[in-house]
Image (cartoon, rainbow, N blue to C red):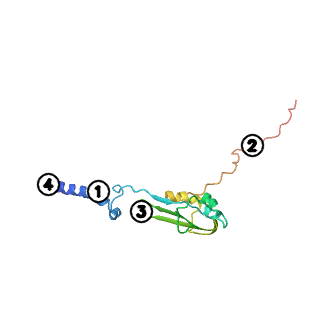
Amino acid sequence: MHFRLPLRLAVAAAALPLLVACESARQWTPNFIQPYRPDVQQGNVVTKEMVDQIAAGMTRDQVRFLLGTPALVSVFHQDRWDYVYLLKRGKGSEVQSRRLTVYFRDSRVERFESDEMPPEALADNLILGRKPKDQPKPPPKEAEPQFKREVEPTRPPTY
């Protein structure tokens, strides 16, 4: 009889690590028991400012300089470059996915299709999972003196 409680505790202690490894157990287990899961980031980070600079007639080298090497270049579609971005958070189920496709004709940009891209100011915060910072405060105006004293113009001394 007195061996039942330690036996149950031993079985529970042995089963707990096995259950934590299961994805379905993540929902009800406490955070301190869950294993570390890193954020997975794949592809090219493309911002709204970068997309705004793409123009018809740009060469492949100009596009590569502006956006970087494309994540996908198909052997069967030589005139199409795909810039794909995927971010899967380790904690939670948030997934960010964006895509930009650039079409070429005669090695020049013919057109492009893009998901809505974040502005450059927010891109880092979205990647890092932080809330956007407030706009910086303007510099203070020139401070007025705290004490004012009227000074009379100097007069020559009278003798």
Identify the mark nearer the N-term, 1 or 2: 1
Q: Quadrant of residue 15?
A: bottom left
Q: Secondary structure at mark 1?
A: helix
Identified at 48% across, 59% down, the residue is: 41
What residue would you read off at disc 4?
3
Separation of residues labelled 3 and 2 (CA atoms)? 64 Å
Identified at 49% across, 63% down, the residue is: 86
**Could you tell me if residue 130 is visible in this image?**
no
Identify the mark nearer the N-term, 3 or 2: 3
Camera-near label (3 vs 4) is 3
- In the rendered structure, the answer to whether residue 7 lies left or right of residue 90 reads left
Identify the mark at residue 92; answer none if there is no mark. 3
Identified at 48% across, 60% down, the residue is: 42
What residue would you read off at disc 2?
149
Identify the mark nearer the N-term, 3 or 4: 4
Give the residue type that dot 4 points to.
Answer: Phe
Give the residue type that dot 1 points to.
Answer: Pro
Q: Are marks 4 and 1 in contact (CB under 8 Å)?
A: no
Q: Nearer the viewer, residue 37 or 81?
A: 81
Give the residue type that dot 2 points to.
Answer: Arg
What residue would you read off at disc 1?
17
